């Protein structure tokens, strides 16, 4: 039997040290090929499928769905498939009897040891002798598989007795007997069925040629139990042979009290309805937010903005029949222009081992776009955003938010931002004191756009108004710089035509 090849969970990029196993795409006993996806895992960055570097038969799966596996720990074990040679014809040698007739005795044959024969022998030893039960390919132990040497009676006819070999086990192992048990190759599947009381004879295998796989047994284990319905015997008829129907006696259903499966909270005295492990993206977000609050001395400034002119600009572009970027793409264009004018907000603070700190500036802008997904809040970034037009920004923002919500964004896309833009107005709120996406030093939030009374040229009018909120790291700049940047973006939204002409 070949030595299993153990595939360790690889480094999935960006120095990630662990991943949560979401699901297996294979089961023990399956034959897999090189680069075949074997599992789906979720990291702090995204959900990815892991391909196998080996081809062969799955021997062991190291982990259950929902379990967190460290990088470098075993993920799957694979063995090379073993081809069982055809059983050799038994050699016969005539023997002289007293009457001179040849008698052919069977010769004990020793099949080539394979993985399957070793597993079969091991399983029979665990079953112990004398069970009397028969499972496909495995009868009651005791003398089975041993050739018997028997001399024929004196006769003028040569007699040959069949030789029982371990190859017989393998042929039975691969055969589906009509109306009997399905073929079961994996001893682990047979063991699982026995431990859970699953009758293999009632299963229809989903594998090739009716092969019963591990998933078939698991399905049977988790299938809801069907209790037999208790029936009352028919009532005897009267002398007139007319059927007499007695009322069925019914019992009221017992009242089922809710079960406190999670116990009771000691502080509040209330039952605990659920416990959800903090892992995956949620774990990464929690750690990043906690670090941001503990390390960054943040401050917040905000301003109301009349966005009427920006909305009118988009309406005019729509009337012209051209593709019109979304409002967020226009605001992103104004943000990149503002960061060029106020580069202090496009930096990062690094702390050396001796405690000294440096402000690291960048020749370029990777604009992060906060996106709410089913897996939590993620921030994919538009790389080189300062080089893109509003239309190009719109296309890239749509692409990134789509892959992020599918869990397919790469670690590079999710971890390379230098400043974040957050549109929380889609949730119907006006403002928020956002938490900076560590290790960045600033985040700009945009609230909903609604009709509000506004003074225009000394007269009261109804305008489209939104609120911009800037949270910044006070270590890299003071309030004057933050206010200057915020005012620049606000002025661009209120007078988009003049600013876009200069961009």
Image (cartoon, rainbow, N blue to C red):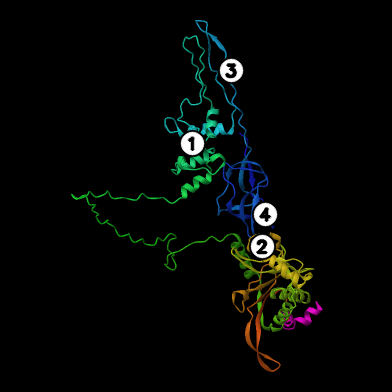
Pointer 4: what residue? 12
Q: What element carries label 2?
A: helix
User: Can you say which quadrant of the picture contains the N terminus?
Assistant: top right
Residue that protrudes farthest toward the bottom in the picture: 458
Disc number lying in front (2 or 1): 1
Q: How far apart are marks 2 and 4 (CA)?
A: 17 Å
User: Can you say which quadrant of the picture contains the C terminus?
Assistant: bottom right
Are the residues flagged by discs 2 and 1 in contact, CB closer than 8 Å?
no
Q: Give the range drawn in magenta.
A: 486-503
Q: In this view, does 235 lie above or below 458?
A: above
Q: Distance between the residues labelled 2 and 3?
A: 67 Å
Of 58 and 244, the residue lying toward us: 244
How packed mark 3 is, by other alpha carbons closer than 10 Å (few <14, some 14-19, many 20 or more), is: few
Q: Residue at x 48, y 26 (%)?
A: 144
Q: How far apart are marks 2 and 1 (CA)?
A: 49 Å
Camera sees residue 380: no
Give x and y (percent) for residue 425: 62, 76
Disc number lying in front (3 or 1): 1
Q: Residue 178 carries which label?
A: 1
Q: Which of marks 4 and 1 is nearer the N terminus?
A: 4
Disc number lying in front (2 or 4): 2
Residue that protrudes farthest toward the front in the picture: 240
Disc number lying in front (4 or 3): 3
Q: Residue 306 carries which label?
A: none
Q: What element carries label 4?
A: loop
Pointer 3: what residue? 91
Q: How far apart are marks 4 and 3 (CA)?
A: 58 Å
Q: Which of marks 2 and 3 is nearer the N terminus?
A: 3
Give x and y (percent) for residue 2: 63, 35
Q: Which of marks 2 and 1 is nearer the N terminus?
A: 1
């Amino acid at each position: 039997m070949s030595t299993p090849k153990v595939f360790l969970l690889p480094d999935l990029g960006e120095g990630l040290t662990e991943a949560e196993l979401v699901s297996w795409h294979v089961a023990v006993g399956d034959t897999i090929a090189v680069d075949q996806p074997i599992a789906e895992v979720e990291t702090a960055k995204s959900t990815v499928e892991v391909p196998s570097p080996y081809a062969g038969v799955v021997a062991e799966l190291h982990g259950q769905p929902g379990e967190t596996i460290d990088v470098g720990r075993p993920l799957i074990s694979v063995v090379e498939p073993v081809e069982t040679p055809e059983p050799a014809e038994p050699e016969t040698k005539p023997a002289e009897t007293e009457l001179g007739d040849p008698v052919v005795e069977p010769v004990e044959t020793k099949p080539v040891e394979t993985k399957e024969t070793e597993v079969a022998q091991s399983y029979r030893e665990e079953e112990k002798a004398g069970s009397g039960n028969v499972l496909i390919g495995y009868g009651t132990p005791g003398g089975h598989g041993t050739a018997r040497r028997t001399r024929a009676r004196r006769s003028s006819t040569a007699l040959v007795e069949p030789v029982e070999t371990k190859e017989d086990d393998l042929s039975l192992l691969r055969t589906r007997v009509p109306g009997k048990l399905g073929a079961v190759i994996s001893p682990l599947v047979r063991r699982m069925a026995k431990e859970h009381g699953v009758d293999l004879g009632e299963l229809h295998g989903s594998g090739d040629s009716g092969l019963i796989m591990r998933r078939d047994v698991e399905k049977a284990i988790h299938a809801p139990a069907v209790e037999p319905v208790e029936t009352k015997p028919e009532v005897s008829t009267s002398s007139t042979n007319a059927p007499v129907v007695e009322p069925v006696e019914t019992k009221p259903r017992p009242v089922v009290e809710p079960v406190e499966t999670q116990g009771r909270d000691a502080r509040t005295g209330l039952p605990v309805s659920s416990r959800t492990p903090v892992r995956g993206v949620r774990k990464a977000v929690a750690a990043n937010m906690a670090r941001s609050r503990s390390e960054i001395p943040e401050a917040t400034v905000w301003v109301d903005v009349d966005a009427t002119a920006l909305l009118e600009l988009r309406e005019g572009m729509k009337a012209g029949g051209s593709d019109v970027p979304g409002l967020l793409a226009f605001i992103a264009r104004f943000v990149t222009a503002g960061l060029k004018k106020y580069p202090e907000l496009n930096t990062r603070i690094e702390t050396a081992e001796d405690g000294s700190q440096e402000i690291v500036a960048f020749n370029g802008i990777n604009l992060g776009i906060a996106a709410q997904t089913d897996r939590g809040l993620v921030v994919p970034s538009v790389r080189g955003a300062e080089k893109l037009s509003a239309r190009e920004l719109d296309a890239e923002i749509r692409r990134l938010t789509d892959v992020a919500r599918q869990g397919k964004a790469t670690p590079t896309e999710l971890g390379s931002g230098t400043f974040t833009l957050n549109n929380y107005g889609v949730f119907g709120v006006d403002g928020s004191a956002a938490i900076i996406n560590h290790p960045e030093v600033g985040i700009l939030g945009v609230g909903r756009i609604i009709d509000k009374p506004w003074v225009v040229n000394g007269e009261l009018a109804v305008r489209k108004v939104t609120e911009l909120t800037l949270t910044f790291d006070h270590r890299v700049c003071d309030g004057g710089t933050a206010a200057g940047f915020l005012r620049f973006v606000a002025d661009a939204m209120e007078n988009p035509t003049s600013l876009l002409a200069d961009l």
